[in-house]
Amino acid sequence: MSELNKIFMTDQDRSAIENILNFSQDTGLNIKGGRIRRTSSRFCLGVEHGDYNGTELFGVGTDGFIWLAYKTNETEQVRLFSGNFPDEGVIEFKLSDVPEPQSEVIAETWARFPWGVDYILRREGIVLTQGIDAIVYGDIPGGGMSRSASLTLNLILSLLDANKIEIEDGFKIVDLAQAVENDYIGAPCGRLDQIMILFARQDMGVHYNPKTGLLNYVPLGAGAVDFRLVILDTGTERPGLEKSTYKIRRAECEELVGRIRQAGFEISCLADIKGQSLYKKILDQFYNSYPDLCDRMTYIFKAQQRFYEMLEAWKKGDIETVGSIFRADGLGLRDEYKISGAELETMCDIARQVPGVLGERMLGGGDKGACGALVRTDKVETLKKAVEIEYPRRHPEYSDKYDVHTCNMVDGVTLFNDVL
């Protein structure tokens, strides 16, 4: 794993840096001469909710970002300000002196992320001694684009850099980031978000196989129709994974795996159920007693079959097939996995009626947040107009909060030097 040092910036970067410099002036945090690390969002093409069920994963980095400007301060104090949560002011703490994991004090503050990074690094024998002054700013759309994973990765990489600690193994960084959310915050996330962001490369798909531990970059095949990834932000506030249906669904899948194993089937996760014969045997034995749990299994079973078809279509540049599989996956998340929400499905319903939308579904943990769509480039404005007309009519309480974003496929981690 290597970070990319870029000497060029986009207008998006320049605007973010201007905001950061204003925040620096307002707060008195000294970042002049420091570095800026930019981490991306992600767009999962498959399998959503597959990581904790053991499936292969495929997705891309997208250009909603978190920027973290930081400079060592020659003390053991960490001082941070978030431009997205200005009311919380400057977060300040001494290294190795943070609240206990999953304690009441961390529940409602963004400071749980830097606290968690310090705690997990120390637990793993990586002791930080050099504090930083830092300002965080992000423009990642609402839930479903992995803001928490992007922030956690950025904090880990930046604090390690400030302390001149090098960890070459990218998957070690992934494990640390997951532990911050799992063990410190209490959010039962898998590894999909961290892998898709940390390893993302511009205009490439990232394919990860957990069984082999191998990660491959997959370019989109030649001849694909001109299309865009579009984010349909419902404007809803999504709770953390520790407070959402995500946690329930993960527990349900683990419960079913336990029951299947007790019945003598040799599986370690739902992804191990691949063959039609094994799937039917388990379904016949368990469906009458546990219909909802078996529905979750059915989603994972079908999604894995769709996954390989989608991957081959991507390699061939057959984006129409990729889109149709993306749509089928969304219907499975709605009807079988049962983890979508009313506003999410409204966005999907609107998109599905627009000619040129190749596929659409909810993104991320579920319940609230954002949907994604694969859209022919010449139909993006048509989709925006359809959403503008219909979504406020059906959800007037979010009429001033929803948004539509078009995305590019980008590098997951970029380091800017000499810009502050």
Image: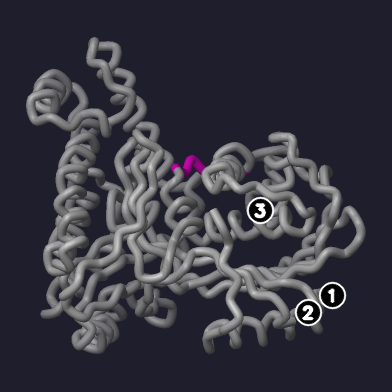
**Amino acid residing under circle 3:** Ile
Q: Check residue 156 in the rendering and tell me which mark sits there, or answer none.
A: 3
Determine which quarter of the picture holds residue 283.
top left
Give the left or right position of residue 199, taking residue 362 as reference. right
**Residue depicted at 54% across the width and 64% down the height:** 413
Nearer the observer: mark 1 or 2; the answer is: 1
Q: Which residues are magenta?
A: 185-190
- The quarter in which the C terminus is drawn is bottom right
Q: Please name the amino acid that badge 1 sits on.
A: Asn
Secondary element type, mark 1: loop
What residue is drawn where x is 37% and y is 62%?
60
Q: Residue pushed farthest right?
A: 75
Where disc 2 sits, the SS reads helix
Q: Is residue 263 above or below residue 315?
A: above
The percent coordinates of residue 386 (x first, y second) are: 22, 84
Tag 1 and tag 2, C-beta contact below 8 Å: yes
Disc 1: which residue: 30
| Rendering coords of residue 390 (x, y %) | 23, 81
User: On screen, 107 above or below 358?
Assistant: above
- In depth, the one of 120 and 104 nearer the eye is 120
Location of mark 2 (residue): 24
